[in-house]
Image (cartoon, coloured by chain):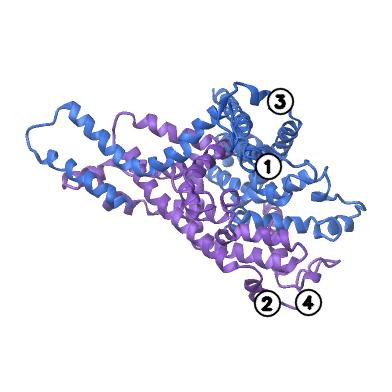
Chain colours: A purple, B blue
Amino acid sequence: MNVRRGVAYGLLVVLSIAVLVPFAWMVSSSLKLDNEVFSVPVRWIPAEFHWDNFTKIWARIPLLTYLRNSVFLSLSITALQVLTGSFAAYGFAKVRFPGRDALFLAYIATIAVPWQAYMVPQYIIMQKAGLVNTHLSLILLQAFSAFGVFLMRQYYLTIPDELSEAARLDGLSEYGIWARIILPLSKPALASLALLTFVNTWNDYMGPFIYLTDNKLWTIQLGLRSFVGLYDAEFAMIMTGSVLSVLPILVIFLLGQKYFVRGIATSGLK
Amino acid sequence: MTSTTVAPAQAPSQPPSKAGPKAPSPARRRWRSIRLGWSFILPNFLGFATLTLIPVLASLALSFLDWDSYSTPKWVGLANVDRMIHNETFWTALRNTAYYALGHVPLTLCAALGFAVLLNQKLRGVSFFRTALFFPYITSLVAVAVVWNMLLSPDVGPVNQLLRAIGIDHPPGWTTSTTWAMPAVILASVWRDLGYYMILYLAGLQTIPGELYEAAQVDGASAWQRFWSITVPSLRPTTFFVLIMLTISSFKVFDLIQVMTEGGPGRSTLVLSQVIFREGITQGRFGYSSAVSMVLFVIVLTITLVQFRLQRRSER
């Protein structure tokens, strides 16, 4: 029995290290000179640590602008998604009205439709509205996703109706029940939704790639990609940029890990 | 935003409830419940309807139109479909997408299940490993693509150095070779996605009662037998969900390929999503690209329905 345990443990350690190798390569390369990145054999620990890569890169590409754009988009989309999503979810989970279930089905059905199948009509609408090449286009596209409504509704269904009944008898309006009873009770689900939305928006490549042509509006992902395209021999600098683009996500992930895992597990299994 | 929608609706909904013994008629109560429900849903619905629901429906209609960004739309029936089935690029992209799915789906599923089973042992430091294995999934795609391109660099990349060290003299050219570019993309995508599906499997594993294993052990079943006759059947609902999610996401693949290979070299990694993007948005051929996107939608829908059928049947 103990032998088997040892084997399982050894396997886990070896495989996990294998999974983490790309990150090790990324960090180690970000601290090297360009011509040291591809050494034979591989040097996992740089001969000399070039921390100055992390100061030089800010002058090399408009990284600050990119980061600011990413932060702005991620925050506004997350805020709108959480707000409208949880509000609509109350309507779906706690208010009984004719046509509700059919409407909810329409929401669910669109989750199964691949985005690629309707991105062209979306683009035409945005073009007619004159919103192509603005941040507003991305905010409008991503802030009202059906997924957010679905996730929150599933959570609201687990909150017993007796609580809202009691509040109703106390004279609280439905909006009051949402704001004062349901919202505070659903903090874990709100956190899951907020974190998942934030990370998705931060990492999104296709949306900004299609809608944003002006360099000043670019997100960190687009900026990094264009840097790679323009200076494909500056290996170390490219890795420095990659580390910087991943770092905010790492921090957020480590802080809210519990909610990530729970959000994924509930969205998956209900 | 919500406060403005709440305030006016709140006022009329209050007085009748305090009106006392005179109960409102059923029709009025029905009307009030509709108004109340919609007042919650409307802020989200406005955005959802204009930017998701309408485009989904429009996309169906668009595929029957001859329309580009300069001309006026004209009804052409199945002409777009006809053009599509005689277009070699479409078939290449369709084949490549299927190839990607055939590699990505089983490999990710096995890796995710394997790691989940390992992590489900009560071992020390499990939470560290879970975090580490999940992290690739939320790492930005551009960083993932760039790092893998470098790792797989044909001449001096670490992967090929390792392959040479273990005696393979002519390791693959990965993203520079038309035969190996797709396996390279699949490798990177499995690495990225396994953590997400691992979490789903872990949640599934936790629902299997421990007594089942204990009983099997008493009966003398080996670990391997226990895995096949308890773990795998108990995980069937999870596997079903994972399969659907994986298949859908494989057929939608875009970002990773766009950043790693841009569909190349040649057209060796060109996938359907890229054809839709190039035709519809870069070239502005709205009608034709919508026809291609309908193919994508129908494929995803069919696979989902077939898997639902199979799942139903196996439950009986």
- Asked if marks 2 and 4 fall on the same chain, the answer is yes
Q: Which residue is labeled 2 in the image? A: A51
Q: Position of residue B128 (x, y in %)?
A: 59, 60
Q: Is residue B16 above or below residue B305?
A: below
- Helix, strand or loop at mark 3: helix
Q: Is A130 in front, or is B91?
A: A130
Q: Which residue is mark 4?
A: A47
SS label for mark 4: loop
The amino acid type found where label 1 is placed reads Cys
What is the x, y in percent for residue B315? 54, 26
Binning the other alpha carbons within 10 Å of mark 1 as few (below 14), some (14 to 19) or many (20 upward) gives some
Label 2–label 4 contact, CB within 8 A: no
Give the Cα distance between marks 3 and 1. Answer: 35 Å
Q: State whether discs 3 and 1 lie on one chain.
A: yes
In front: mark 2 or mark 4?
2
Callouts 3 and 4 close, C-beta under 8 Å:
no
Looking at numbered disc 3 in the image, what kind of residue is underneath it? Answer: Ile
Q: Quadrant of residue B123?
A: bottom right
Q: Chain of mark 2?
A: A
Dot 3: chain letter = B
Which residue is the site of mark 1? B110
Mark 3 or 1: the one toward you = 3
